[in-house]
Amino acid sequence: MSPAVNPVYLTGSSEGWPLKQLAAAGYRGLELTPACLDNLSHWQPAARKAGLRALCVNAMDELRPYLTGSLSDAVERRRRDTLRRLLCTLAKMREQGIPFLVVAPSRLAEVYQSVDEARPLLVESLRELAAAGDTTILLVAAPFRLFASSAETAAIVDEVNRPNVAAALDVGHALLSDERPAAAAKRLGKRLRYVQVHDADIRPGVMRLDRHLPLGDGSLEKEEVRAAVGVRPFAVGITPAADPLDTARAALRWLG
């Protein structure tokens, strides 16, 4: 099911994906958003025909405090609502045999919590998600959020201490958090089960934004991405400014 691609990020739409062309380009899997599980008829028959299988659900859109939710929200009602939605997503994933769910910590500025306040709530939430079945819950570090480093991700995974809670690595996020992807992957070690690939521009004087740039348009180095991916499942999650299909093809050429 790898290499995979996130067609929602690629096309900016939840339907009308060029699945046959993506398969012809070399993609074998799909990274979806939770909303995609509510409109299976829009994409699943075409995906099956093209030989593409769903590899992962990326729940980042479900984890925006005050907009959608947080796994460490200090207001218990809001945290429970977030967990309810993610547990519903997990149930749909089990029906479809999708192995990975990616989640992330909350933004510090939006939840007004200290690390000591947020961490036990995040750990409790991850354990509850893990108890819902055998789907692997992957914690990914994200820039501008709590626990934004690979070392913090590793420590939280260890504290949760559940066999189906592990780590994902987003190589663009690593750059934006001043980590080199290969070093972050090494730090995560055996906890790392999945890699998300897009570029980020961290040149001096450039505003740091999580824009999911096409590969080669930012500061990533090809060899370090290859080292971070290794033999792990990975997905390309890029938001191109021009032709989506050409950008998707170019990503696999860039990775070699």
Image: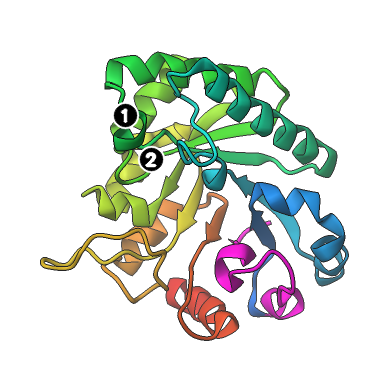
Residue 2 on the magenta segment: yes
Residue drawn 37% across the image and 28% down it: 154
Judge whether residue 243 can be spotted in this image. yes
Toward the left, the furthest residue is: 204
Mark 2 is surrounded, within 10 Å at the Cα level, by few (under 14), some (14 to 19) or many (20 or more) other residues, namely many
Up the image or down, 43 lies above or below 110; here it is below
In the structure shown, which secondary structural element does the residue marked by tag 2 occupy? loop
Q: Where does the magenta region start and end?
A: 1-24
Location of residue 210 (image quadrant): bottom left
In the image, residue 253 lies in the stretch drawn in magenta: no
Name the colouring of the figure.
Answer: rainbow
* Residue at the spot of label 2: 141
Where residue 163 sits in the image (x, y, percent)? Answer: 59, 21
Res 205 → quadrant? bottom left
Q: Tell me which residue sits at (36%, 65%) in the image.
A: 199
Residue denoted by label 1: 152
Marks 2,1: beta carbons within 8 A? yes
